[in-house]
Image: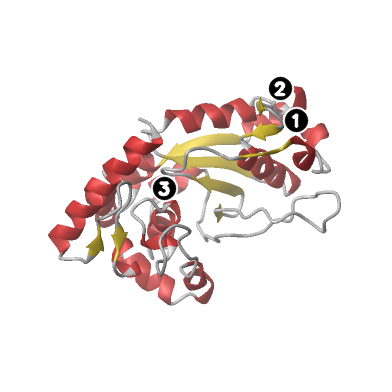
Amino acid sequence: MKNTELRFELKRFAEAYAHEKGLQVDASRQSATIFGKIEDNFFPASYKAIQRNPVWKKRLEKAHQQVAGANEMQSSNSSDALLMSIFCHPKISSWKGVKELLGVTSIVPAFGEGPGVKKKGTKGDETEIDLALDKIFVEAKLTESGFTEKAVSEVEKYTDLKAVFHIESLRRKGDCFENYQVIRNLLASIQLGKRHLLLCDERRPDLVRAYFETVGCLRDQKHRKNCGVVFWQEIARVCGKDLSAYLAARYGIS
């Protein structure tokens, strides 16, 4: 399924969910539904937990780039809203299946951490990690078209790029490296000795291909083995029944 098709699918699920719950939404846009209240775009128990955590709560303030007066996490397409609905759930660390899926013994989530990847001319770049756990950095995707691209001259400023990657094998488009977000996230995880996961939808095999294309350019086999993909659907199958039901109704994730 293409990213545009998934947007329409998520819009349909969001509107059906809002109608069932009596929630106010703006459905006038073609590819996304905007929830009138940001809390309506979250699993209720997770939203309450977010409100009790000042650092998590601050994440909700990010403005929507295309919708004036709205926040990014009011959108039916927000991967961050989905991520936080799952990992801010007050019982997340008690779900054995989720911990086994991620390969961790506990879950204490942090969102938007800046590892400061080593880059010439800086004290560390501005990379943000979607989700940081004890031993893992996670890049979360939903309807994004891809992992963006960046000028070769800019990417080559990363201090460890040539030591970590076979750079001649990295995919290019003109004067840009493709899959830039994966490149810098892998550099971050290797710099700090963490594993790296892509968290995405089963309906987006294009993202999985692009991810492993980039992972395959890592020089060290140990680093390649420390990378993997987990699907939202896999989490839905092993999390608590209340959250699982929400993910099915709200996102069609089951």
Please determine whether, in this image, residue 83 is positioned above or below residue 58.
above
Q: Which residue shows up at 20% across the image and 55% down it?
A: 17
Give the distance between the C-alpha atoms of the residues marked 3 and 2, in whole angstroms: 34 Å
User: Which of the two discs, 3 and 2, labels the residue nearer the N terminus?
Assistant: 3
- Residue 102 x %, y %: 49, 44
Mark number, residue 165:
1
The quadrant in which residue 84 appears is bottom left
Horizontally, residue 193 falls left or right of residue 86, namely right
Q: Which residue is mark 2?
A: 169
* Closer to the eye: label 1 or 3: 1
Please determine whether, in this image, residue 36 is positioned above or below residue 132.
below
Contact between marks 2 and 1 (CB within 8 A): the answer is: yes
Please determine whether, in this image, residue 138 is positioned above or below residue 229.
below
Image quadrant occupied by the C terminus: top left
Amino acid type, residue under disc 1 in the picture = Phe
Q: Which residue shows up at 66% across the image and 53% down it?
A: 127
Q: Which residue is mark 3?
A: 98
User: Is any atom of residue 170 visible in this view?
Assistant: yes
Give the distance between the C-alpha atoms of the residues marked 2 and 1, in whole angstroms: 8 Å
Amino acid type, residue under disc 2 in the picture = Ser
Residue lying furthest right? 121
Q: Secondary structure at mark 3?
A: helix
Amino acid type, residue under disc 3 in the picture = Val
Q: Secondary structure at mark 1?
A: loop
